[in-house]
Image (cartoon, rainbow, N blue to C red):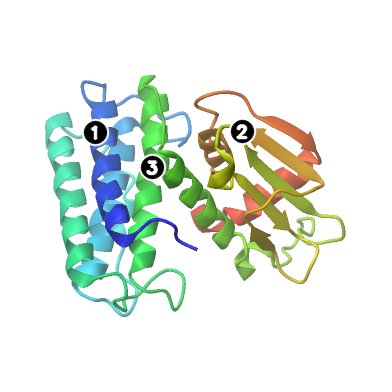
């Protein structure tokens, strides 16, 4: 389910990058990023710009196999010139949006999730930028907010990843994720009823399942929508507090396993 349009994703990549750049404007590029241990602000911005350029290459060349991601994972760039880095970010996001629009949402390209159309990358790069913008805002002490439909779509994307085999297959030395009575409920407290601000995750079957609905669960997480999104990504709340009712250990285990795709 992708409630945002392809064009909205392309526009949000630009919008979120501009907001990210505004957070970094005038800040010391060597400020440490609390939510990305070992990175400073310069490295964070390079990572985002590198991700944009990596995907732009995939889309522009219609790649049918993996493309080297050196720009994404390069841990150097600890002291880039702020003005040059700002320009680099702006140019990279613009090039990515152009490439996506030129290709169209249904074009076949390689994606990290098999058998997905190009739309996957438009969505992934939108939320990659949304979350790393939170890292930058926290680093410089700026306010952080996300449009409700964008935050909800980012949670939908996370839920989708949480159903992949890598997220729930048994791992040596780790407790099983699936089992009787294992359910999670996420409740956004700041959304109108028509926004369907509930997510129910069912871990009782042979594979995880989720849908947008309220329900009884072994653990319930309640709070503003943006804070729910930040929580699943392991970031502190931006706009308020979160209330956890029930099995917090299950929530932590699910969040860690669902984030398999963020692991180095």
Image point (23%, 64%), residue name: 100
161 relative to 107 in the view: left or right: right
Disc 2 crowd rating (10 Å Cα; few below 14, some 14-19, many 20+) is some
Image point (23%, 37%), residue name: 18
- Residue 206, x across and y down, in percent: 76, 72
Mark sitting earlier along the chain (1/3)? 1
Mark sitting earlier along the chain (1/2)? 1
Res 79 quadrant in image: top left
Disc 1 crowd rating (10 Å Cα; few below 14, some 14-19, many 20+) is many
Viewer-side residue, 82 vs 74: 82
On the image, numbered disc 1 is attached to which residue?
21
Label 3 secondary element: helix
122 relative to 182 in the view: left or right: left
Q: Which mark is residue 189?
A: 2
On the image, numbered disc 3 is attached to which residue?
130
Q: CA distance from mark 1 to mark 2?
A: 30 Å
Res 25 quadrant in image: top left
Q: Where is 8 relative to 169, above or below?
A: above
| Residue 264 in sight here | no
- Residue 49, x across and y down, in percent: 25, 47
Mark sitting earlier along the chain (3/2)? 3
Q: CA distance from mark 1 to mark 3?
A: 12 Å
Label 2 secondary element: loop
Label 1 secondary element: helix
Viewer-side residue, 96 vs 172: 96
């Amino acid at each position: 389910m992708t409630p945002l349009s392809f064009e909205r994703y392309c526009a949000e990549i630009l919008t979120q990058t501009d907001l990210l750049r505004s957070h970094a404007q005038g800040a010391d590029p060597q400020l440490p990023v609390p939510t990305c241990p070992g990175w400073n602000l310069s490295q964070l911005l390079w990572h985002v710009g590198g991700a944009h350029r990596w995907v732009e290459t995939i889309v522009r060349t219609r790649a049918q196999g993996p493309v080297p991601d050196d720009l994404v994972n390069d841990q150097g760039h600890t002291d880039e010139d702020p003005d040059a880095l700002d320009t680099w970010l702006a140019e990279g996001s613009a090039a990515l949006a152009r490439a996506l629009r030129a290709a169209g949402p249904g074009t076949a390209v390689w994606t990290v999730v098999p058998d997905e159309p190009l739309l996957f990358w438009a969505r992934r790069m939108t939320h990659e930028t949304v979350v790393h913008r939170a890292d930058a805002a926290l680093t410089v002490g700026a306010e952080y907010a996300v449009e409700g439909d964008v935050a909800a779509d980012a949670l939908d994307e996370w839920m989708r990843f949480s159903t992949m085999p890598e997220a729930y297959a048994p791992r040596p030395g780790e407790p099983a994720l699936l089992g009787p009575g294992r359910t999670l409920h996420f409740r956004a407290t700041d959304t109108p009823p028509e926004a369907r601000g509930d997510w129910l995750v069912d871990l009782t079957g042979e594979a995880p399942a989720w849908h947008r609905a309220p329900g009884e669960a072994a653990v319930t997480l309640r709070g503003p929508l943006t804070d729910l999104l930040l929580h699943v990504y392991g970031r502190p709340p931006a706009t308020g507090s979160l209330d956890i009712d029930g099995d917090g250990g299950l929530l932590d285990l699910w969040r860690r396993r669902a984030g398999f795709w963020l692991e180095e």
